């Protein structure tokens, strides 16, 4: 069993302050959000917000009410710094999406960009469902394996990234359905990419550069397996 605090990968992302740490990056986020009916009165939650790149875009572009949550204190500090610098009023909370103290039916949209793959999915989806208003939308960009993998291969990937399980499209759909979501749609947009953004912490130990190298090697090695899909569904 891999626990989140064991994920060197997530800690590497935090130390390097990688913004847009999901497939397609911020340009894919912008494209997806164009297809949603966001109003200035909409309440949006960005789950696992990382350094807050998407949350900042939503708050500035749509002038809407944005709340962000992330479990990692380094990510939270970097997200807060971003909002302060850009003079954006985004409510940033440090905590786990598996259990929050936010009130029921608060949000019109909840975004999870490469986050659910790392958490206890049943608990996180139950919490997301609770937090969404009736008719609210979940938009998730999530790691999706194309087929079942040998246990050795699966272990290699899970160990490095800290995924608690590896899911196919079918597994994700079943999970969304079990959590009560409807109108589940799956997309992929492989034409959109973005330059990653970095907000590097001071005095990073050299071992974290090794984790970055390992991540690059994993991506090359498992190019066809480390795939993703965009899932949208409605409460
Ligand atoms: C791959 S990063 C993606 C960050 C951001 N969404 C982005 O696209 O740049 C995953 C993020 O999920 C956060 N995370 C992991 N487990 C979490 C949990 N239980 N609750 C909230 N955030 C969590 C990590 O700290 C990290 O910032």
Image: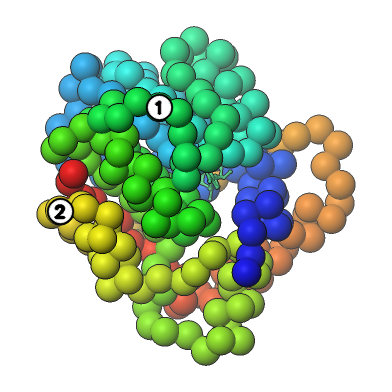
Q: Secondary structure at mark 2?
A: strand
Q: Is 46 placed left or right of 74 in the picture?
A: left
Picture layout, residue 159 above or below residue 27: below
**Residue 37 x/y as whole percent:** 15, 32
Between the C-alphas of marks 1 and 2, the distance is 23 Å
Taking the spot 63% from the left edge, 65% from the top edge, the residue there is 2
**Residue 15 x/y as whole percent:** 71, 41
| Label 1 sits on residue | 102
Taking the spot 18% from the left edge, 22% from the top edge, the residue there is 39
**Residue 110 x/y as whole percent:** 32, 38
Taking the spot 56% from the left edge, 13% from the top edge, the residue there is 84
Taking the spot 38% from the left edge, 82% from the top edge, the residue there is 147
Would you say the beta carbon of the disc 1 residue lies within 8 angstroms of ligand 1? no
Picture layout, residue 104 above or below residue 204: above
Picture layout, residue 141 above or below residue 149: above
Q: Which numbered dot is residue 219?
A: none
Q: Secondary structure at mark 1?
A: loop
Picture layout, residue 162 above or below residue 62: below
Tell me if I can see residue 188 in this picture. Answer: no
Report the mark closest to the observer, 1 or 2: 1
- Disc 1 crowd, CA 10 A, few/some/many (<14, 14-19, 20+): few
Q: Which numbered dot is residue 182?
A: 2
User: Which sits in the foreground, 118 or 33?
Assistant: 118
């Amino acid at each position: 069993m891999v626990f989140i605090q064991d994920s060197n990968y997530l800690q590497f992302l935090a130390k390097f302050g990688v913004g847009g740490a999901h497939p397609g990056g911020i340009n894919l986020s912008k494209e997806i959000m164009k297809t949603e009916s966001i109003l200035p009165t909409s309440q949006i939650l960005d789950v696992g917000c990382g350094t807050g790149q998407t949350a900042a875009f939503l708050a500035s572009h749509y002038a809407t009410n944005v709340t962000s949550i992330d479990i990692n204190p380094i990510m939270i500090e970097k997200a807060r710094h971003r909002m302060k610098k850009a003079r954006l009023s985004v409510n940033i909370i440090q905590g786990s999406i598996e259990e929050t103290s936010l009130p029921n039916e608060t949000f019109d949209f909840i975004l999870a960009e490469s986050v659910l793959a790392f958490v206890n999915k049943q608990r996180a989806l139950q919490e997301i469902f609770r937090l969404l208003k009736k008719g609210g939308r979940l938009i998730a960009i999530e790691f999706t394996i194309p087929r079942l993998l040998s246990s050795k291969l699966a272990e290699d990937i899970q160990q490095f990234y800290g995924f608690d399980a590896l899911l196919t499209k079918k597994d994700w759909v079943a999970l969304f359905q079990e959590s009560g979501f409807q109108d589940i749609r799956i997309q992929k947009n492989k034409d959109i990419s973005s330059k990653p953004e970095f907000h590097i912490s001071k005095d990073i130990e050299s071992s974290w550069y090794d984790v970055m190298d390992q991540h690059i090697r994993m991506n090359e090695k498992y190019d066809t397996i480390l795939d993703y899909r965009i899932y949208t569904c409605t409460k």
